Amino acid sequence: MKSKIFLPVVFIIVIFAILFSSAYVVDETEQVVVTQFGRVVGKPRQLPGLYFKIPFIQNTNYFPKNLLSWDGDPGQIPTNDKTYIWVDTFARWKILDPVSFFQTVNNRISALGRLDDIIDPAVRNLITSYRLIETVRKSNRVLDTFEDADTIDFEKRKGSIYNISVGRKKIINKIMVQARPKLEGFGIKLMDVKIKRINYVEEVRQTVYARMIAERKQIAEKFRSEGKGEASKIRGDKERELQKIESEAYKIAQKIKGKADAKATLTYAEAYNLDPELYSFIKTLDIYNESFDKTNSLILSTDSEFLKYFKGYSR
């Protein structure tokens, strides 16, 4: 009785195990390659859903379908103008053909190694083919650092060493053109390559900083000189304006004073014309007062006109 019950249960378990091992699920971010004894069977499963395979004989190999990242190792690269720089790049890629990917690189670790072998040389070849400014800039937009220093002969420099003929964007496109066809054989599509960071090597960096400091000091000295010249001009204008004001004021004051003196003289003249004898007498007394003192000696004839008022007083 027990054996009759046990056999159906075992049979059901075996059937369930076979069904469970034969079914597999593919979600939206995955794609599956089915292999049999290491060889690819059928087409890759790239649409999400429930699929079946031969249990215990066929195996499923899952690969991501979304974008994947590659981060290159920073390396020292010389530019065309013999400047050594550190370049750090990164890229985005995806598995476009999972069958080719499985047959060539098989897994993501090996794929990253292939990306290293292909993208790094392309970056090095393109960086060394152009000047540093071509890698740094992508257009001839006027640099902000030159707007305040246009009198330090930077206009000539902007027209020569700072002129961009290719630019960073085109260099990136050329890296893509070099690297993308080489990766297609591995079932990989290179989506984008970017330069994360560019910096001078330590030996060059100190020299560059010193030159930048010298240029900033030169610009600062230019501004200081212009400020001193403007201050001298303002002071000169102030002194000239002050002298002009003082001259105008002195002219007006003298004019007023002359009018006042003329009016006073006229008043005196009118007053003295009323009695000329009195005027002559007062003026002669003033002369007596200034002429006669303890230190002066004066010898005059008794007939002198100067003593006429003394004579008249004595009579």
Image: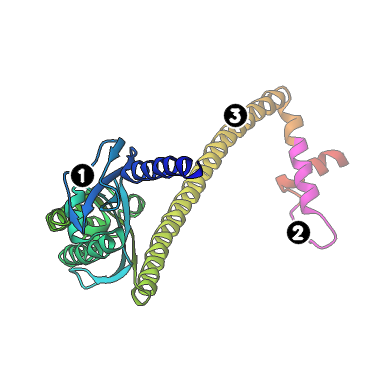
| Residue 221, horizontal then vertical, whole percent | 42, 62
Q: Inspect the magenta stretch and tell me whether residue 191 lies in it.
A: no
Task: Find residue 44 and name its label.
Answer: 1
Label 3 residue SS: helix
Residue type pointed to by label 3: Lys
Depth check: give the residue in front, 20 or 2: 2
Depth check: give the residue in front, 185 or 157: 185
Q: Are marks 1 and 2 in contact (CB under 8 Å)?
A: no
Q: Residues within 10 Å of mark 1 (few under 14, many from 20)?
A: some
The residue under the point 29% across, 48% down is 55
Q: Quadrant of residue 26?
A: top left
Q: Inspect the magenta stretch and tell me whether residue 282 lies in it.
A: yes
Instruction: Give the distance between the C-alpha atoms of the residues marked 3 and 1, in whole angstroms.
Output: 118 Å
Q: Is residue 225 above or below residue 140?
A: below
Instruction: Give the distance between the C-alpha atoms of the residues marked 1 and 2, in whole angstroms.
Output: 150 Å
Give the residue at mark 3: 259
Q: Is residue 272 above or below residue 44?
A: above
Label 1 residue SS: loop
Depth check: give the residue in front, 251 or 188: 188
| Residue 185, horizontal then vertical, whole percent | 13, 56
Depth check: give the residue in front, 225 or 183: 183
Closer to viewer: mark 2 or mark 3: 3
The residue under the point 36% across, 77% down is 203
**Residue range corresponding to the magenta coloring:** 281-301
> Visible in this render: residue 194?
yes
Residue type pointed to by label 1: Pro
Label 2 residue SS: loop
The residue under the point 74% across, 54% down is 301
Q: Are marks 3 and 1 in contact (CB under 8 Å)?
A: no
Give the residue at mark 2: 299
